[in-house]
Image: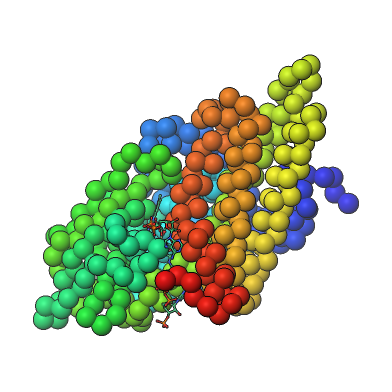
């Protein structure tokens, strides 16, 4: 058998195809060159400079709407998309977020529920990274419970008029197009909103202490007038936005393991070099227990992600499966990063090392795309047949 690899303790790489390994190395290369040398500075400054340049780099590599077919999208497998998410999040959760929101939320909404004209108008530019998208579901007063949203779309002749506010919207202030979900007289509908439409604004949310290398914004919709064909014609009801969340949540199942791997790598290397009481701290049993537990949960998480990826590629993946994966992998990833932090001692709180940044980012990941509690209740409902949300 091949040598033991501490960053692939269960030998999961052997289950990946040559194409999957090739995707991994090209994304890893991009991250090594374009992101890792700078991302701690971006995080510290609380900004994602040259987001358009980054989007074009991602677009050139086919990472935007990567698992969608047609309209300039790369048409890769769900597993390949997941592997890309893992590598991106090994750099920073904020970077993976940018790609998730673009491909799995904004593009997917148009690709799955849009008209042919909407697809032609937006998807090729978004796939190339020339146009940036955002996805507005959450509101200041409605996060876990989007079904009670207040944003309203009313008809004025053939036009639609949108009024309301969305909150915590990734890519909001840099977006060219916002997919906005609003309550109509009938059901919730999705709208494709060019961000230069009068009445639309997207102020940046400041003072974030997590996911700092990511643009997060409020969307203000003040009498935004849209033509009749701005509505996504193929869906109504909460199923519309929730179907998009399945895609992004699936990416997070993989992505969270990237943050975990990066932290394991940092902790292992540090433990081998750092000496206390006359020997490397890696030689202490308590440190080894931490490392072994990290390896265990990392291996289980990656296996679960790969299993769900294969199921998605075979058309067998259910939303409840995605909830299981997101719940487990984000919860275990944050635990791994926090444990890695302890191994680095005081250096663990410095941005010189990636671990505090990862642990801190995962606080957001634990909450967005459905909180731990929501996914627990989704699994509980699937097991018992009883909904305990309300
Ligand atoms: P409920 O009555 O259960 O369902 C309403 C309708 O939706 C359908 N449905 C789904 N469809 C597709 N996929 C799913 N996962 C679905 N879950 C439910 C359901 O069948 C029903 O359809 P129909 O045709 O019968 O009307 O709805 P509920 O109001 O009880 O809510 C259920 C709950 C709590 C699970 C849901 O509201 C929920 O998931 N809440 C969490 C909200 C959330 O995750 N927000 C995320 C916002 S986007 C974001 O965070 C981006 S982060 C940025 C990044 O990724 O970087
Ligand atoms: P709340 O729903 O108010 O929940 C507060 C607490 O109460 C949580 O612990 C929750 O689990 C718990 N709770 C709520 N209901 C129940 C219940 N029935 N039973 C038990 N516990 C319950 N949204 C978008 O639409 N688009 C984006 O691009 C986006 N990007 C984001 C980026 C960042 C950095 C962050 C932090 C958030 C982002 N979000 C985005 C919003 C995110 O999806 C919401 O924050 C999330 O859905 C939770 O909503 P909330 O913050 O309003 O918390």
Report the residue at 54% width, 41% height from top: 359
Residue that protrudes farthest toward the top in the picture: 278
Measured as percent of width and height from the top left, residue 250 is found at: 54, 63
Judge by depth and name the residue closer to the eye, 152 or 40. 152
For this view, does 258 lie left or right of residue 275? left
Q: Is residue 32 above or below residue 175?
A: above
Q: Which is more toward the observer, 123 or 235?
A: 235
Q: Which residue is found at the position 66% from the left and 69% from the top?
A: 310
**Left or right: where 120 falls relative to 186:** right
Of the 4 image quadrants, the one containing the C terminus is bottom left
Quadrant in the rendering for residue 33: top right
Residue at 58 percent across and 52 percent down: it is: 331
Residue 54 drawn at (x, y percent): 42, 46
Q: Is residue 34 above or below residue 198?
A: above
Residue at 20% across, 78% down:
228
Locate residue 249, reporting x and y percent: 51, 62
Ligand number 1: quarter of image: bottom left
Evaluate whether residue 176 shows in this view. no
Between 56 and 13, the residue placed more toward the observer is 13
* Residue 307 vertical position relative to residue 364 in the rendered view, above or below: below
- As rendered, which of 96 and 116 lies closer to the eye? 96
Mark yes or no: residue 368 visible. Answer: yes
Residue 312 drawn at (x, y percent): 60, 72
Q: Quadrant of residue 231?
A: bottom left
271 lies left or right of 210? right
């Amino acid at each position: 058998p091949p040598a033991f690899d501490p960053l692939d303790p269960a030998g999961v790489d052997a289950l990946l195809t040559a194409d999957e390994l090739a995707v991994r190395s090209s994304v890893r290369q991009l991250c090594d060159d374009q992101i890792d040398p700078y991302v701690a500075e971006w995080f510290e400054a609380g900004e994602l400079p040259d987001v358009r340049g980054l989007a074009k780099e991602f677009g050139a590599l086919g990472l935007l709407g990567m698992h969608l077919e047609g309209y300039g999208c790369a048409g890769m497998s769900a597993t390949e998309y997941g592997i890309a998410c893992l590598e991106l999040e090994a750099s920073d959760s904020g970077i993976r977020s940018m790609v998730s929101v673009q491909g799995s939320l904004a593009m997917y909404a148009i690709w799955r529920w849009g008209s042919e004209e909407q697809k032609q108008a937006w998807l090729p530019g978004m796939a190339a990274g020339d146009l940036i998208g955002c996805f507005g579901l959450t509101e200041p007063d409605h996060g876990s419970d989007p079904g009670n949203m207040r944003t309203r779309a009313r008809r004025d002749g053939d036009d639609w008029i949108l009024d309301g506010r969305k909150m915590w919207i990734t890519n909001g202030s840099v977006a060219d197009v916002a997919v906005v979900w609003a309550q109509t007289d009938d059901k919730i509908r999705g709208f494709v909103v060019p961000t230069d439409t009068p009445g639309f604004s997207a102020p940046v949310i400041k003072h974030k202490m997590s996911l700092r290398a990511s643009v997060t914004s409020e969307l203000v919709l003040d009498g935004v007038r849209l033509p009749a064909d701005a509505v996504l014609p193929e869906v109504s009801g909460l199923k519309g936005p929730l179907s998009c969340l399945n895609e992004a949540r699936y990416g997070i199942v993989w992505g969270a393991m990237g943050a975990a791997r990066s932290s394991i790598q940092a902790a292992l290397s540090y433990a081998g070099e750092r000496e206390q009481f006359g020997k490397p701290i890696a030689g202490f049993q308590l440190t080894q227990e931490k490392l072994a537990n990290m390896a265990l949960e990392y291996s289980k998480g990656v296996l679960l992600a790969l299993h769900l990826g294969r199921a998605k590629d075979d058309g067998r993946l259910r939303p409840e499966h995605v909830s299981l994966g997101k719940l487990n992998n984000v919860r275990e990833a944050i635990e791994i990063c926090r444990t890695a932090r302890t191994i680095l001692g005081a250096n663990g709180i410095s941005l010189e090392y990636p671990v505090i940044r990862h642990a801190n980012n995962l606080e957001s990941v634990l909450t967005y795309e459905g909180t731990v509690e929501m996914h627990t209740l989704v699994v509980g409902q699937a097991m018992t047949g009883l909904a305990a949300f309300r």
